[in-house]
Image (cartoon, helix red, strand yellow):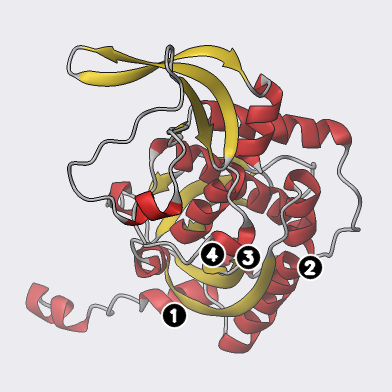
Amino acid sequence: MMTTTEAREFSPAPIDFALLARLTGGLGDRKTIEKISADFGRLYADFLPDVFNSETGISIDVAYTGCSSGLMTDLVADLGDTFTLADGSLRNWSPNFVLACGNSFIIALMERMLGALPETIEQPFERPLSEIELDLAQMVLGKMGEVLRSGVNAQGGFEAILERSHNFEDRPGPDEATPAEFGVAIRLAVEIGKVASELALVIPQRAFLKTKVVMPKAKGQSSKTKEEWYERISEQVRRSHVTLEARVRLQTLTLGTISRLAAGDVIAFQDKKDVTVQVRANGMDMYACELGRSGERYTVRVKDNISTDDEILDHLMG
């Protein structure tokens, strides 16, 4: 008869987690993972730019750059703090996945929406997104979700559900009660004008390995969809902070006089009574104003609109 001590010595060792996952369909081999990841990459490279351009009028380039395998929590952590993320689910495909977009892409896109010319937008400094930029990121990640839903062809035609987008630094830590699972991180390069950034998908391998990616037929987006996108972006622009500048016409001086001006010299306004001021933003004259003062601060009072509300909004949105 075996003693308790002997029973402990001969008890079987727990099965390796990775081996168990491989035996139960939760971990694939490298060749299979790379093949399916490349299919996802082709889906996004071919389809996302068309979807994006048809609804925003802005051209982007997307290219697949590679994939990596590992635990879901580690793959998300490896993205780093230059990404904004949203957790998602798609019925009949996967109850959990993560979509991510580089912050620099959203910052550059917001500049375009606010009227900046593409050639003037430089590679932005990486930083967390503001609340209004997170709203824009939510829309971009939503387009990524639409492409995902079209490509995995899950039964029932359900829409991908995304939770609120958040900066990487605001992501809560992993739930210790949730079982660990292996996933795949698919990385994509995205360019908007001169700005280069990244997109990423982190997908559990249990759903990923069963996926046969299909290429949806390209089709023009409806004008209604364009209008809805425009209205949503318009609302974000209306809540954006825009830097204004005021121009005041000064007295005409000769070139010789101007060349001799020194600290302390005074130049008079051209107007002798009410001083007319033109207020502009992003190079567009918006309001005719009069100069005034309130307490210790100089002010301008709006007298007339140089441009209509729609013209102003269209200009600021580019």
Mark 3 crowdedness (10 Å alpha carbons): few <14, some 14-19, many ≥20: many
| Comes first in the chain, label 1 or label 3 | 1
Q: Secondary structure at mark 1?
A: helix
- Residue 22, position as x, y percentages in the image: 51, 77
Q: Nearer the viewer, residue 303 or 79?
A: 303
Q: Are the residues flagged by discs 4 and 1 in contact, CB closer than 8 Å?
A: no
* 10 lies left or right of 279: left
Name the image quarter holding the N terminus: bottom left
Q: Secondary structure at mark 3?
A: loop
Cα distance in 3D space between marks 2 and 3? 18 Å
Q: Is residue 251 above or below residue 74?
A: above
Q: Is residue 214 above or below residue 271?
A: below
Q: Disc 1 designates what residue?
A: 19
| Comes first in the chain, label 3 or label 4 | 3
| Comes first in the chain, label 2 or label 1 | 1
| Comes first in the chain, label 2 or label 3 | 2
Cα distance in 3D space between marks 4 and 1? 27 Å
Mark 1 crowdedness (10 Å alpha carbons): few <14, some 14-19, many ≥20: few
Give the residue at x 76% y 53%.
Answer: 53
Q: Disc 2 designates what residue?
A: 46
Q: Nearer the viewer, residue 125 or 98?
A: 125
Amino acid type at image mark 2: Asp
Amino acid type at image mark 3: Gly
Q: Nearer the viewer, residue 153 or 254?
A: 254
Q: Is residue 153 visible?
A: no
Q: Are the residues flagged by discs 2 and 1 in contact, CB closer than 8 Å?
A: no
Which-is-in-front pick, marks 2 and 1? Answer: 2
Q: Disc 4 designates what residue?
A: 200
